[in-house]
Each structure stands twice: as C-alpha cells, then as structure tokens.
Image (tube, coloured by chain):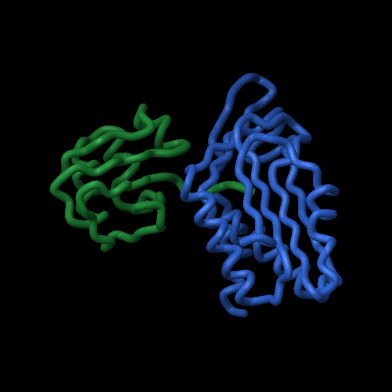
Chain colours: A green, B blue
Amino acid sequence: MTLNLIYFARLKDTFGRGGETLDSGAASVAELLAELAARGGVWADELGSGRVFRVAVNQTMAGPDTALAAGDEVAIFPPVTGG
Amino acid sequence: MSNFTIRVGHAEFEPGAEIAALSGNPAAGAIASFVGLVRNYGDAAHVTALELEHYPGMTEAELARIVDEARQRWPLTAATIIHRVGYLPLGEQIVLVVVAAGHRRDAFAACEFLMDYLKTRAPFWKKEHYQDGSSRWVDAKDSDDDAAARWMAQ
C-alpha cells in the first residue's frame, strides 16, 4: 500500500527530503519506523530505539500501535518548539 | 468558532487591534493577553533571527483542539491565537494569545494554559540564526513539558 510520508525541521534536514511516497507493508506506526530504520545510516540514527521524535497519522498525534491504511499521511518530526 | 479565532501565517499582527476586537461583549469583564517576541539569546547567545516552520493543516487543527480544551475548563467569551511562521528577525512578534472572560482569574488562567499547551503540542519548530551566520534547530525543553503537565493535575 502507498503511504505519504512527511518530515519536518531537523529530520527534514537530516533525511535530505521533506517527504516521500512509500510503498510499504507496515500495518502500524511501529512497523513503519522499523522499515525506515532498516535503511541504515541517518535513518537508523534518528529513528532507532532511544531517539526522541513524534509521529502524526492524518494530522493527529499517533503512537507505535496506531494502525496504518493505504493513503495515510504519516508525519515524523522532532518534539515541537513553537510559541 | 466566530468568537474563537486562530490564524497562522507570516503576516505581522497588532495586539491592540486584536484586544479591541474582543472588547465588544458586555459579559466580558476581563481580557488577558500574551505576546511572545524573538529574543537575542536561546539555546546559544547572539541570536539574530528565528525561522519558524509548521505543519500546515495539523497546526490549525491542533490549536483548535487546545482552544476547545480551554473552553471546557473556563467560561470564555472569546479567544484569539495568532502564530507567525517564516523568518522573524530579533524583536519581531511571534505569537499572540488573547482571552476574554467574565472574570480576570479565568482570563489569566486560560491565557497561560493556551500558551503552555501551544508550546508542547502545536506542530511548530524554531531554528535559531546566530550573528556568525550559523543556524541550529532549537531543542524542546523539559521546562515546557513540566509547565503543560501541571494543568493535567487540575
């Protein structure tokens, strides 16, 4: 299935892209993160265990167990720093 | 949402005009406001500008959720949140929160609550630009998480 991934702030810079369309078999956020981390390099560095980041699915904050469906918009970003 | 306004964009705002806009309700005896400015120090010294990035769509939705939570806690007659994005030089205004209520305690409390929740939940990110030309994404602060967490006990 196709997922629309978006990266923000430091992660956008580190990954060298603002987003991507991914053909993924991930059924949950945790599975997607494992799939991305398996790319190695900066992906493993930033999305590996112990790293702090946030995930939103369809513009709502999500957790590792949040289920994914075809066409979902999944955003991965650092903890927010507005205000 | 007529009395409850959320605006996200680069355009400057005028706090006096925004406060005046909430002053028409005869049941509103109190208006509290907060303005956040670009300061000359942050994670490092000699900050010359901030660059604000956000998540269009989710930002507005999250701010609306935060306003809804405030309205469940306090009887507010109106509120305005304006948050700027893009490149903002030293001294520029970043954020405005204006809250109108019957009484001052509700207005003060809701204004602080909205800022505390905005800082920890609304998808904005700051990058600091320094005098030497370098720049760096700002780290999230534990103190901001603590400020937001204390409302959960109330």
In the rendered structure, the answer to whether residue A57 lies left or right of residue B50 reads: left
Q: Which residue occupies the foreground of this view, B32 or A64?
A: B32
Residue B102 position in % (x across, y down):
80, 75
Q: Nearer the viewer, residue B71 or B52?
A: B71
Horizontal arrangement in the rendering, residue A7 relative to residue B105 (left or right): left
> Looking at the image, how many numbered discs can be counted on the residues?
0
Residue at the spot 68% in from the left edge and 30% down from the top edge: B49
Quarter of the picture containing the C terminus of chain B is bottom right
Vertical side of B147 occupied by A39: above or below: above
Direction from residue B126 to residue A15 in the image, left or right: left
Q: Residue at x 52, y 41 (%)?
A: B54
The quarter in which the N terminus of chain B is drawn is bottom right
Q: Report the front residue among A45 and A35.
A: A35
User: Residue B63's image quarter?
Assistant: bottom right
**Who is closer to the viewer here, B61 or A22?**
B61
Residue B148: percent from left, percent from top: 60, 65
Measured as percent of width and height from the top left, residue B90 is found at 75, 32
Find residue B55 and report its horizontal and vertical position in percent.
Answer: 48, 43
In this rendering, position of residue B25 left or right of residue B53? right
Q: Residue furthest top?
A: B133
Say which quarter of the image contains residue B89. top right
- Residue drawn at the location 45% of the way across and 36% of the way down: A10
